Image (cartoon, rainbow, N blue to C red):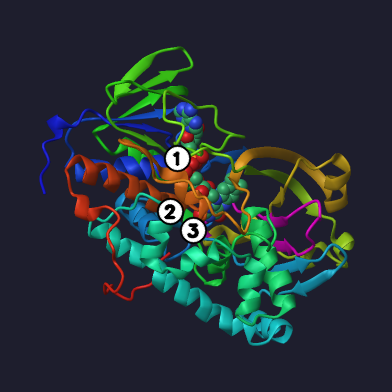
Amino acid sequence: MVVSYNLLQSPAIVGAGIGGASSAFFLNALLENEGQIDVFERSDIGGRLATTVINGQEYETGGSIIHPRNRYLVNFTRDLGLRERERPDGRLGIFDGETMVFDGSSHTLMMVAQLVWHYGWDVFNIQNYVKDILKDFSKIYEHQENGYSFTTVEKLLSSMNPSFLDKMKHSTYEEFKEHGYSNSFIEQLVRGGLRSNYGQNDDIQAFVGAVSMAGVEPGLWSVHGGNKLIPQKLLHNTETVHIIKSDIKQITLQSDGIYSLTDSSDNSVNYDYVIIATPLNDDISKIEFQNFPSSMYSFKGNFHRTVATFVTGFPNASRFGYADVQEFPEEMFTSCKDLFFNSIGRQSPVDYVTVDHEKYMSSRPVYKVFSRGPLSPENINELFTQIDDITIVDWAGAYPSYSSNDGDLPPFQLHKGMFYVNAIESAASAMETLAIGGRNTALLLFNQFSGRSTHIDPDLTGTQTSSKTEL
Ligand SMILES: Cc1cc2nc3c(=O)[nH]c(=O)nc-3n(C[C@H](O)[C@H](O)[C@H](O)COP(=O)(O)OP(=O)(O)OC[C@H]3O[C@@H](n4cnc5c(N)ncnc54)[C@H](O)[C@@H]3O)c2cc1C
């Protein structure tokens, strides 16, 4: 369907992370490269996709791991002329606060044997569980390809599988218990993964728990040069995108239904359509809404703080019961709920290539420690020795604080002509889910503008989709 762009004033997008960039990219495609899309960004393009430089090399500080079945991220990477970064193999260990309760080998077969020895059939069952989730999740790609859009997170999740909504209402622990998994599997592997990926324990809602467990599949990757290159290139390669460096502090609904965006220097610009692509939760957002009806969704949920502390030095092997530092695993999860750190992982730079593996192994190692708050000097000295450098990146708003009764979810449509990409974070915060949220809001705007009401909140129960699995 061809829509005359002239009838649509230039839409505004607030936020140039992966959500805003994806929204701009898909909206531009729907508008067939016509007109202009204004993207407001107060800081660096990429948002929570960012890097830091340590000893002359760049490391991912925020979103780093991409799943091989993330269709949009795979396609963006390929179409933007980027490539996947190789990742060094590594061993997984799980620390319960006292001892290492799991200590994996670097040989894949040996590691599988160790996992089976520790966790029995749960190791195979989880593969099938993840496959089933991915199969349902992949339906969203077909829906979006067909132009369908959803006004709420509930409707979007239900379009993939109505049971996804139920997962939002019980805890990850309950989910895996119901599916027959052992306590040790849940409290060590599932909780360990959640603490590393979301800084939270297995009492959080089960949909995000399922997304976290997708990491058990092989082939996880990152973008060579840094994941932030995806939003940067998406925006810079889209000719109709106009990036405006500006901190939006207020959005006012005028009596004629037009939105006025005001920045921190008190400049205002008017738009018919606005897409908000940054979290609006009370504790982290400073955007004020003026003259909106009191019925508009209010953003009460909190965001979780995660501090990434990069330490150049050697792990304190004896603290974890190792005789030699070489025995320390490359990835350490933790299973103790109130431990002062969530995970420790050896980092490879964003331009790592396997041929340089020897150089990487012989260089001074860089570890990333995730924790809920800043580590004290005593904490750091407990975990590391021979420290050369410490770099701290404090994500005050890393991802939502998930609970298991996130009943009242934020909508994708905040008001007529105003849309919210980050509503999807209430289900699961990940680069791919935000790309999906970005496309959903672009489709919503387009469908409403062009009168395609049959493509908004369609009832897709019983529709056939291909069985390709993606997440
Ligand atoms: C430590 C950490 C580790 C993570 N690990 C992974 C991982 O391994 N894999 C994965 O898939 N995901 C991971 N995530 C989650 C992932 O990074 C996020 O879900 C995703 O990047 C969010 O993208 P976004 O565009 O919605 O938001 P953001 O990236 O936060 O972008 C929002 C943008 O809006 C801008 N902005 C905000 N307010 C205003 C304003 N008033 N005016 C103008 N601009 C504004 C901000 O500056 C920012 O650039 C991780 C996140 C963190 C913090």
Residue highlighted by disc 3: 66
Q: Nearest the camera: 270 or 404?
A: 404
What number is the disc on residue 347? none
- Residue 152 located left or right of residue 171: left
Q: Nearest the camera: 106 or 134?
A: 134
Residue 217, placed above or below residue 435: below
Query: Tag 1's secondary structure?
Result: loop
Which amino acid, mark 3?
Ile
Residue highlighted by disc 1: 17
> Do tag 1 and tag 2 residues touch (Cβ < 8 Å)?
no
Marks 3, 2: nearer the viewer: 2
Q: Is mark 3 within 8 Å of ligand 1?
A: yes
Which amino acid, mark 1?
Gly
Give, as a single range, the part of the protein colored magenta.
330-353
Queried whether the magenta region covers residue 347, the answer comes back as yes
Residue highlighted by disc 2: 153
Say which label, 3 or 2, has the lower sequence index.
3
Which amino acid, mark 2?
Val
Residue at image coords 60%, 38%: 53
Residue at image coords 65%, 61%: 194
